[in-house]
Amino acid sequence: MGLLDWSETAKRFAAARNYWVSTASLAGHPHAMPVWGVWLDDRFVFSTSPASRKARNLMSNPEVTVHLEDGDAVVIIEGRAAEVRDPIGLSAFLTAYNPKYRWDFTLEQVARGVFDVHPARAFAWLGSEGESFGGSATRWSFVGSNAAKGG
C-alpha cells in the first residue's frame, strides 16, 4: 500500500464524528474521554466544560493526544492544546461545529472551554494485521505549517 498522504489523512480525520482526547494531570494521572470537534486550518478544535477533568488537565499540562475511534483506519495526533478565547476564533469554531453536529451553540455558551490542538506529530495506518498495517503505517512531524512524512 505504501505511506499515506497527509492531505487525505487530514480529510479522514476531519470527517470523523467522535474523537478520543487523552490528557494527563501535572502528577501524570491519565484521562481519556470522547469529544466532538472540528478540523480547522490544520488544527483540531473541540469544546468541553471548563470544569471538566480534561479542561483542568489541559490548563495545567497542555500536552494532548487525539485519536479517532477506528482501530483499523487509525489517525492519531499529538500536540499542545490552548484555550481559544478570542471571538474570531470562537466564531470560526461555531461556524464549523454547529452544522457538523446539528447543534446551536452560541458565542456566549463557548466563551470558555474551547481548545485547539496544534499537532506536533501524527500517526496513521490502515488495517490491523499483516502487510496492510506494515505497508501503510506513516508518521508525520510538523514544523510550522509543513508536514514532513516519515515511515
Image (tube, helix red, strand yellow):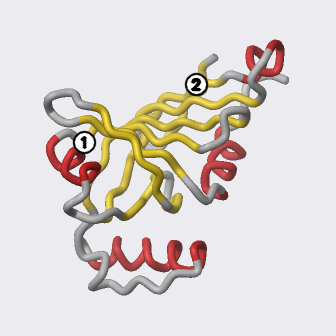
Residue 59, position as x, y percentages in the image: 17, 49
The amino acid type of the residue labelled 2 equals Arg
Residue 53, position as x, y percentages in the image: 24, 50
- Answer above or below: position of 56 versus 29: below
- Answer above or below: position of 36 versus 103: above
The residue at the point 46 percent across, 34 percent down is 142
Q: Earlier in the sequence, mark 1 or mark 2?
A: 1
- Label 2 environment density (alpha carbons within 10 Å; few <14, some 14–19, many ≥20): many
The residue at the point 20 percent across, 39 percent down is 61
Q: Is residue 138 left or right of residue 128?
A: left
In front here: 49 or 16?
49
- Circle 1 sits on which residue? 62
The amino acid type of the residue labelled 1 equals Pro
- Answer above or below: position of 34 versus 77: below
Residue 41, position as x, y percentages in the image: 49, 59
Q: Is residue 143 visible?
A: no
- Circle 2 sits on which residue? 139
- Label 1 environment density (alpha carbons within 10 Å; few <14, some 14–19, many ≥20): many
Identify the element where label 2 is drawn.
strand
